Image (cartoon, rainbow, N blue to C red):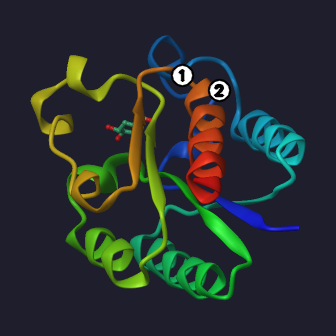
Amino acid sequence: MPTVLILNGPNLNLLGTRRPEVYGSATLADVEALCREEAERLGLEAVCRQSNHEGQLVDWIHEAGVEHRAGRCVGVVFNAGAYTHTSVALHDAIEGAEVPVVEVHISNVHRREEFRHHSYLSPVARGIVVGFGVYGYVLAIHGLHQATRS
Ligand code: DQA
């Protein structure tokens, strides 16, 4: 079964307790279960990973590139958390790995502080889903699935 990588960056392990008024009450385990269910419905296997470390995220993007080239991975659903706004390394990793990435943010970052308005990932992302809560992960999985069929 082809895979979709669900990648979460820094502080997303705190989902459920961190600022629930902004990010909601679902935990990371809830989000991962939602992704697994939705992926399975589409004939995909969701592989779920989270790290607070930039280099680890870079390594996983590279691995996803290898898997994508081998025809085993449709792409990456990526919430890079705060690294979205700071990381040239993640921009370069996505560009270099040539794997389709959908950038996801649970909150609408454009309604928030100005430092969250700029993304280093958007210019190299296949698509972007912002502001739909954790349902954004589901939308992103559907987007990647559709992109592989057209
Ligand atoms: C976030 C938005 C980022 O600005 C923030 O640093 C996060 C979560 C979101 O999902 O809304 O950690 O990516």
Viewer-side residue, 127 vs 13: 127
Residue lying farthest to the front in this orientation: 150
Which residue lies under the disc numbered 2? 16
Q: Quadrant of ligand 1?
A: top left
Viewer-side residue, 9 vs 66: 66
Which picture quadrant has residue 111? top left
Is 35 displayed left or right of 16 in the figure?
right
The answer to whether residue 75 is above or below residue 8 is below
Which picture quadrant has residue 67? bottom right
* Contact between labelled residues 2 and 1, with CB atoms less than 8 Å apart: no
Which marked residue is nearer to the observer: mark 1 or mark 2?
1
Rendered residue at 62%/46% (across/down):
146
Q: Is residue 112 visible?
A: no
| Relative image position of residue 73 (x, y in whole percent) | 68, 71
Q: Amino acid at mark 1?
A: Gly
Residue lying farthest to the top in this orientation: 21
Which picture quadrant has residue 74? bottom right
Rendered residue at 33%/70% (across/down):
90
Residue lying farthest to the left in this orientation: 114
Rendered residue at 64%/44% (across/down):
141
| Relative image position of residue 47 (x, y in whole percent) | 76, 62
User: Circle 2 sits in a helix, a strand or a loop, which is it?
Assistant: loop
Rendered residue at 22%/57% (across/down):
123
Q: Amino acid at mark 2?
A: Gly
| Relative image position of residue 69 (x, y in whole percent) | 59, 86
Viewer-side residue, 124 vs 9: 124
Which residue lies under the disc numbered 1? 133
Q: Is residue 52 visible?
A: yes
| Whole-number angstrom distance, CA of label 1 to CA of label 2 | 12 Å
